Amino acid sequence: MEALVNPHVLDVSPYKPGRPVEEIQREYGLKRVVKLASNENMLPIPAHVRRAIRLELAQLQYYPDSDNYALRRRIAEYNGVGMENVIVGAGSVELIQMLIRTFLKPGQTVLTSEKTFSLYKSATIEHAGRAAFVEAPMDAGLRFDLEAIAARIDDAAKIVFLTNPNNPTGTLLPGAAVRSFIARVPADRIVVLDNAYQEYVDDPRDYVTGLDEIRSRRNVVVLRTFSKVYGLAGLRVGYAMAHPDTIALLGRVKPPFNVTRVGQAAALASLENDRFKKRTVRLNRRNKARLLAQLQGLGLRVIPSQTNFLLFFPGVDVAELNQRLLQQGVIIRPMAGFGIPDAMRVSVGLEEENDFFIAKLGPILGEMRR
């Protein structure tokens, strides 16, 4: 069978998401399971978004608007750009795949940091093979090392992904450093600012949204998602903003009807006001500070985060710790797949979910340390 397959596909490591709650309940016979593995918004979506979803259910016999007209118009208004600057995808993952298919030619490479979102790597390898993916080392603080990335921009480098804040480390690149880096990148290379977690940044004044850059440069693309702060992870809606010429090229590879009617309606309703977003950010900031203190109180090294998750180093065997937590009804994320085998990532949940996690983690660590 392998002889029939595109050889690049055989080099792709399947993405391993956080395990579903239902699966852990079945496997271990548990009634209560807390999932803090996938950086989801733990709050239920607001009533006006649920209403928009219910209204759309009566239209499911019809294909969605393939042009995403109403949603693109609202996204453009919300961000102060033109409709021609916006394209919608089935989450950021589809947009990443579209960017690579559109702009990566044979012999060219995708460049990013190690220890970042693994879909950049798998999407590149699937399209162009292992040699097309290049990683730069991180700095000592687990941040993107922009100097190391810049040093690897050779004649082959075509697309550069900057994840800011970064997943899974939660670290942030200062605004001045990002702007300086973009200014150094040749105009015939694509710089992608993956801003999936931008709403969680503590100080927006020191953050590059990319909006100024897409107005002044043709080679900058901004990725945003409705999966995190807006709580629509189950509906898969994201968008990219860029120069109109770039958007038009991406439109050539965008699958028809790629975002469902329900997804479009929910995303559109989510942009009606910012109350839910602001509530989410406030709650996350408070609960993250408390969870950080709890983890540090267990003697753990924790990376300060500008997102809705924390990366920590348990100092014991991660695979065994993960298995023991699953048996106790706690799903978090081992980081071997992200290139950090001695770390785990925990999403910031509701206070009672975080407390449940800590109540299980403490005794297990105590036993494993003895």
Image: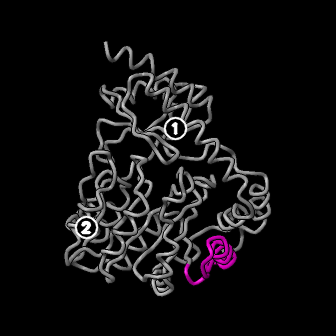
In the figure, residue 218 lies in which quadrant? Answer: bottom left
Q: Which mark is residue 36?
A: 1
Q: Position of residue 367 (x, y in %)?
A: 37, 14
Q: Considering the numbered disc 2 on the image, is that residue within a helix, a strand or a loop?
A: helix
Mark 1 residue type: Leu
Residue 145: x and y, percent?
29, 57
The quadrant the C terminus occupies is top left
Dividing the picture into quadrants, the one containing residue 148 is: bottom left
Which of these two is toward me, 152 or 39?
152
Q: CA distance from mark 1 to mark 2?
A: 35 Å
Residue named by callout 2: 150
**Most foreground residue, 48 or 164:** 164
At 52% from the left and 27% from the top, the residue drawn is 357
Sequence-wise, the earlier of marks 1 and 2 is 1
At 78% from the left and 52% from the top, the residue drawn is 47
Q: Residue at x 25, y 65 (%)?
A: 133
x%, y% of residue 288? 54, 37
Q: Residue 217 occupies which quadrant of the picture?
A: bottom left
Categorize mark 1 by other alpha carbons within 10 Å: few (<14), some (14-19), many (20+).
many
Nearest-to-viewer mark from 1 and 2:
2
Q: In the image shown, does 224 or 129 lie closer to the viewer?
A: 224
Residues 62 and 12: in front is 12
Around disc 2, counting alpha carbons within 10 Å, would you say few (fewer than 14), some (14 to 19), or many (20 or more)? some
Q: Which residues are magenta?
A: 65-85
Secondary structure mostly seen in magenta is helix
Is 83 located above or below residue 123 in the figure?
below
Q: On screen, 216 above or below 165?
A: below
Q: Is residue 144 left or right of residue 244?
A: left
